[in-house]
Image (cartoon, rainbow, N blue to C red):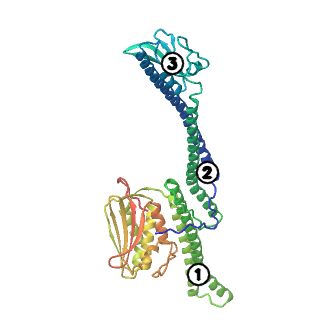
Amino acid sequence: MTREPRRARPGVRPSGGLGPLGRRLFAAFAVVALASVALLTAAALVGADRGVSSAHRADRQRTASRVAAATADAYRAAGGWSTADLSAARSLAAGAGAVLTVSDADGGMMSGGSGSGSADDHGMSGPGRGHRGGDAGSGPGASAPVVVDGGTVGSVRLVFPPGSESAGRSAAWGWVAAAAVGALALALVVSWFVTRRLTAPVVRVASTARALAAGDRDARARVDAPGELGDLARAFDAMADDVGHAERARHRLAADVAHELRTPLTSLRAGLEELRDGYAEPAPDRLAALHDQALRLGRVVDDLGELADAESARLSLRLAEVDLTALAGAAVAAREAELRAAGLTVRTVPGPAPLPVRADADRLHQVLGNLLSNTARHCRPGDSVTVTTSATPSEARVEVADTGPGIPADELPHVFDRLWRGARARAGSGIGLAVVRELVTAHGGTVTATRGPDGGTRMTVRLPRAAAPTPHAARTP
């Protein structure tokens, strides 16, 4: 499945830069990267210097050992120092760039007895004379004993030029410096990428918030980011959707209220103008009709007041432990006259007693009263109403079921909306069931409307059960 390319909505500017937060994050990442690379570079330079020095020492010692072996061979072949040919030893020393000094067992310096090459070229002064050191003695050196047939007959010492280690050290330092530059560049690139990934959703949400504040109610962040940043963006979009729905509901409510008030006001004003201008006589039936319009207007205003109270009920609930079975019986008794006047047969099916819930008894009585009044308005004479209380381990239920004409399936999801008046409505303002939903929701419960198995309507209120019943829990109005 392909995804549509994202298009910036009006009022939401794409986030091209990092923003203040992004710049601070990038600066922090850069400082950490620079400090880490500097520390590692210093450690690498020290380690490389020591490694190069150790390698050179080992190499010098190996060269000294080879020269000592060649010197021992010459001593063994000549039978002594006086006629020993040290040319092979001198060649090895010269190949390593070192100056050779050969000493006998007593520490006296020896020269070669035969061989090619001048004594001056190999650092030897001549037969029977010592080493002409010159400046060679100031460089690093290495020594090794001359062992012949298990006995030490002398020693060799190699003196290397002072700058012999600088080339290797310079090469090692060059590689370390190049690696440090590369690591720093990579760290900065990664820091930039991570900073963009972290701040882009925040910048986008901030831009969307500014667009919403400027009046663009369709602006959404729509950021697909992992972890908490994605949760933040999705929560913001959900909040923006709720704000949009609430605003549309507010506009719709204002329009519906204006419509509900306009009809009785228009009728009342027209009737009063007729009486004032003498077009109609103030007959009792005419005055009764005007009085009915005034009563309808008052009912709409009262229902709107109840709805406002219900919406703020969460802040004003006086919670206590209430016996829902007893409360349902009291509500039926209070509305029984109204139900019988509508020609309905009332029946109660009490559940377990007591059935404790933590609630505001007055508000729950109002909930059940509104449900019963709604049934009285919309059922036909001869229909029956059954009020049932029941319980599960986690919730208490009260059900108001009737055998009336029922509610069309497409209207069931809307019966608890504000000012909803379905096709079967004959009276009422369409606010009573909205009050029911607000009050039940304030108690942490739910209310649903379904069709009964044999027709009619079934309203079910579900409330959380109290932890444990206590004596005298029931409270009835």
127 over 304 or under it: above or below? above
- Label 1 or label 2, whichever lies nearer to me, is 2
Q: Secondary structure at mark 3?
A: strand
Q: Position of residue 348 (x, y in %)?
A: 33, 70
Mark 1 — residue?
Answer: 263
Depth check: 336 or 233 in front?
Answer: 233
Please give left or right for residue 65 compared with residue 209 in the image.
Answer: left
Q: Position of residue 144 (x, y in %)?
A: 46, 19
Question: Distance of mark 1 from mark 2, alpha carbons?
Answer: 59 Å
Of mark 1 and mark 3, the one earlier in the sequence is: 3
Mark 3 — residue?
Answer: 157
Q: Secondary structure at mark 2?
A: helix
Q: Quadrant of the C terminus?
A: bottom left
Please give left or right for residue 177 compared with residue 371 in the image.
Answer: right
Question: Distance of mark 1 from mark 3, alpha carbons?
Answer: 122 Å
Image quadrant where residue 356 sits: bottom left
Q: Position of residue 473 (x, y in %)?
A: 38, 56
Query: At 47% from the left edge and 61% from the top edge, which residue is drawn?
Result: 442
- Label 1 or label 3, whichever lies nearer to me, is 3
Please give left or right for residue 389 compared with residue 107 in the image.
Answer: left
Q: Position of residue 55 (x, y in %)?
A: 49, 29
- Label 1 CA crowd tier, 10 Å (few <14, some 14–19, many 20+): some
Q: Is residue 476 visible?
A: yes
Of mark 2 and mark 3, the one earlier in the sequence is: 2
- Label 3 CA crowd tier, 10 Å (few <14, some 14–19, many 20+): many
Query: At 58% from the left edge and 83% from the top edge, which residue is drawn?
Result: 290
Q: Which mark is residue 22?
A: 2
Q: How many marks?
A: 3
